[in-house]
Amino acid sequence: MCVVVCDTSLAGWPTPRESHLTTLTERRAEYDQNVWDHTLDAFQLTFDERAPFDKDALDLLVGLTDAISSGQSNDDLGRTIASLVGHSEARLFVVLQAAGLTRNKILTDLKASSSALPNVRVPSTLAALLNSAVALKTACDYLAVRVRKVLEPLTIYEDPRPALEAVNQVSWPGWIRQERAKRQGHEAEYRVAVMLEALGIPFVPEEKAYNPLCRDAQIDAISYDIVVPDLDKPVVAMKSTVQTSNIGQFGESKANLEVTEAKESLARSYREPPMLVAMIDGVGFRSNIQGLNGVLENADEFCQFKTIWKGAVIAADLLSIPLHLALPAEAIERQGEFLRTYGSRLTLHEATAELRASLPATAIVDAGEAFLWREN
């Protein structure tokens, strides 16, 4: 087992407040080398791998297919949808998915058209919509037209269930897109929070380790996903952003703007501003160069899913918390300057199967390409 104790007392080494990567070119090179392969990530697969429709969902869609086959008009079909859905949000989700819609799409469409329907007030959630007879009727009339376009071709089958399962699989990526995008960004900060909590490094909001969708920490009316150790004397303020697809031209500078505003705000709010760390990843940033470059240039440091361990090392260094870090040999060489910068309380090991086996399983905290632990 190779062990290296980092000694940052050597003359000429950068202080913890200085970035170890001084040029955008260096930062871009590191980013590109470690981009998250979301197609292999277990979290991503929970969205990408769609389970088959259950019996209730199939029976619901078979009922709608039969209603179309029997010659029901759109008005009648709307009433059939309302009858079959009832007050079940899960059943409404099935109809929405089959129609190629999303949870937000139907609400925004209904609100856009409600100006011509003065007696209809469209609720802000689907749960509330299900409890409004007038709004539900309007929604089911809207759905009838769209469901017919999908299910009418299936009326040629004596048993449409296999074809309905094909609809399930092909409509799933569109149905889950918004939910996946929302949770994908929160997944990054969630993993940071879980890592910090397991290592006993204090942070706020503590709830992030259990509920990644909880409210962010607020400093000067700006949100931060994680602040270490607290809002009174912060040493790290983290903003996270993950993009796995092209976000379009109108979102190109958003990530950069958020980081720039955060840095300016921290400078106003504290005599000794905390280090601004970006948790940034995803192949989508390769088509958003303006946003990527802006974040990498303006954040004090950054980490990715593969290098998420950096967040713990920075926090531990600034709080003088001793840590053990095990990295693959090539990563030790590649991250040498970073380790010298933030290694004041770090014991560095080469990650091997033998080292992992020698440690209590409960002590090990996996963090991307590394694993960490603290002495008891």
Image: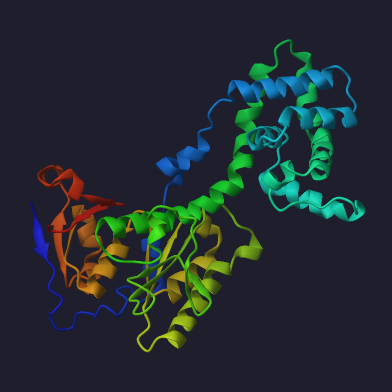
Residue 34 visible here: no
Q: Residue 118 sits in which quadrant?
A: bottom right
The residue closer to the viewer here, 82 or 39, is 82
Q: Is residue 324 left or right of residue 160?
A: left
Above-or-below relation of 213 to 69: below
**Which residue occupies 28% across, 63% down?**
312
What x and y, as percent, mark residue 223?
50, 70
**Which residue occupies 73% across, 45% down?**
129
Q: How is the image coloured?
A: rainbow
What x and y, as percent, mark residue 81?
78, 30
**Which residue occupies 78% across, 32% down?**
82
Q: Is residue 89 left or right of residue 273?
A: right
What x and y, as percent, mark residue 363?
18, 50
Q: Is residue 266 left or right of residue 316?
A: right
Q: How many marks?
A: 0
Which residue is farthest bottom?
A: 271
Q: Is residue 32 left or right of residue 181?
A: left
What x and y, as percent, mark residue 343?
19, 70
Residue 40 visible here: yes
**Which residue occupies 60% across, 20% down?**
55
For the C terminus, the image quarter is bottom left
Which residue is farthest top?
A: 158
The residue closer to the viewer here, 367 or 27, is 367
The residue closer to the viewer here, 302 or 73, is 73
The residue closer to the viewer here, 4 or 172, is 172
